[in-house]
Amino acid sequence: MQRSFVMIKSDGVKRGLVGEVIGRLERKGYSILEAKLTTPDRATVEEHYAEHKERPFFGELVNFILEGPVMAMVVEGENVIEVIRLMVGDKDPRQAAPGTIRGDFANSTTKNIIHASDSVESAEREINIWFSK
Ligand code: CDP
Ligand code: MG
């Protein structure tokens, strides 16, 4: 069994997509082990996106996440990391396939509803950031 860190971003919460996203994960057969609606501080979001610190979109990204509460979750299942990334879809709206969460609900590269860990190492790091404090 594997665990992923999944976050419904501030746009997803604002747009009322929490139930939709959690429903998709549940119907896929995954277990929600932890879930909290939380308004993070800037340091937490900057740590979460540390790999993008030098990128030109970093400031805009962090400010966007801080616009409102996010739904932070730990999701468990077989190969959950890779499969949820498939369910999430591409960050570029031109590439996000219909049927994926971003393909169905996002039209912006920044405001794209959901984050999901991209590796076992990222999942461990992110779960620690969001659920050990
Ligand atoms: O979220 P994902 O892992 O699919 O993409 P990423 O390349 O790791 O980028 C993290 C997040 O930064 C994206 O989900 C977008 O919200 C944001 N981003 C952006 O605002 N502009 C870009 N050109 C690339 C990413
Ligand atoms: Mg990423």
Image: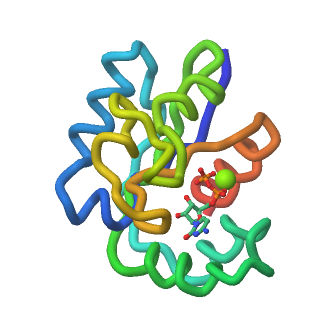
105 shown above or below 3: below
Observer-nearest of 71 and 106: 106
The location of residue 108, given as percent across then percent down, is 40, 64
The location of residue 74, given as percent across then percent down, is 53, 38
The location of residue 118, given as percent across then percent down, is 70, 41
User: Residue 14's quadrant in the figure?
Assistant: bottom left
Colour convention of the picture: rainbow
Observer-nearest of 17 and 69: 17
User: Residue 2's quadrant in the figure?
Assistant: top right
Residue name at image x 49 percent, y 38 percent: 89
In the shown orientation, is residue 30 left or right of residue 130?
left
Q: In the rendered picture of this protein, how many numbered marks are placed on residues?
A: 0
68 shown above or below 59: above
Viewport quadrant of the N terminus: top right
Residue name at image x 38 percent, y 55 percent: 113
Q: Residue furthest front?
A: 94
In the shown orientation, is residue 33 left or right of residue 117?
left
Observer-nearest of 47 and 105: 105
Residue name at image x 61 percent, y 63 percent: 133
The location of residue 48, given as percent across then percent down, is 67, 65
24 shown above or below 38: above
In the shown orientation, is residue 5 left or right of residue 56?
left
Residue name at image x 57 percent, y 23 percent: 83
